[in-house]
Image (cartoon, rainbow, N blue to C red):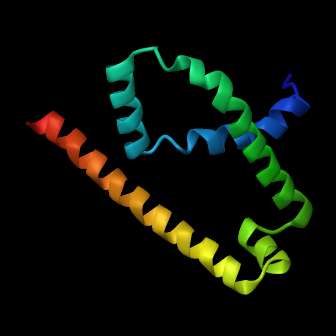
Amino acid sequence: MFKRTPSFLRHVGPGVVTGAADDDPSGIATYTQAGAQFGTGLLWTVFLSLPFMIAIQLVSARIGRVAGKGVAANLREHTPKSFLMAMVALLVIANTINIAADIAAMGEALQLVTG
C-alpha cells in the first residue's frame, strides 16, 4: 500500500530543510525589498549562485557524515586553536548581527500591519 521513499528523496530531504531554514525575517525582508526594486531583473543570478550553494551544502553534509562531527570539531583537529577561536568568534558576531536584523525586520513588518 505504501511506497518506499526513493533513495534520492531520502538524501535530498535534509538539504531542502536546511535550504528552507534561511527564510528568516531578515532574509524575507531582503528578498521582498530586492524584488520590489528590481523585479525579475536579478533572476539570472540564480544560475550562478545555485551551484555554489549546492556545493557548500553537499561538502558540509559529507564532512559531517564521514567524520561524525560538526565543522568546529573538525577544525579543532586540523587547525591551530587560535584559528578555531577566530572562526567561532566570527560566527558569534555573524549570528548576533543576523538576530538583530531578524528583530528589526519583524518590527518593521509589525509596523506595516499596525500602522
Q: Is residue 85 above or below residue 60?
A: below
Q: Position of residue 54 (x, y in %)?
A: 74, 37
In depth, the one of 103 and 41 nearer the eye is 41
Left or right: residue 79 compared with residue 113: right
Q: Residue at x 86, y 22 (%)?
A: 1
Could one spot residue 5 in this view of the protein? Answer: no
Q: Position of residue 110 (x, y in %)?
A: 20, 42
Residue furthest to the bottom: 81
Left or right: residue 39 compared with residue 105: right
Q: Residue at x 47, y 68 (%)?
A: 93
- Toward which corner of the image does residue 10 lie, by quadrant? top right
Q: Residue at x 46, y 15 (%)?
A: 41
Q: Position of residue 81 (x, y in %)?
A: 72, 85
Could one spot residue 100 in this view of the protein? Answer: yes
Q: Is residue 22 above or below residue 3?
A: below
Q: Position of residue 96 (x, y in %)?
A: 42, 65
On-image quarter of the C terminus:
top left
In depth, the one of 32 and 78 nearer the eye is 78
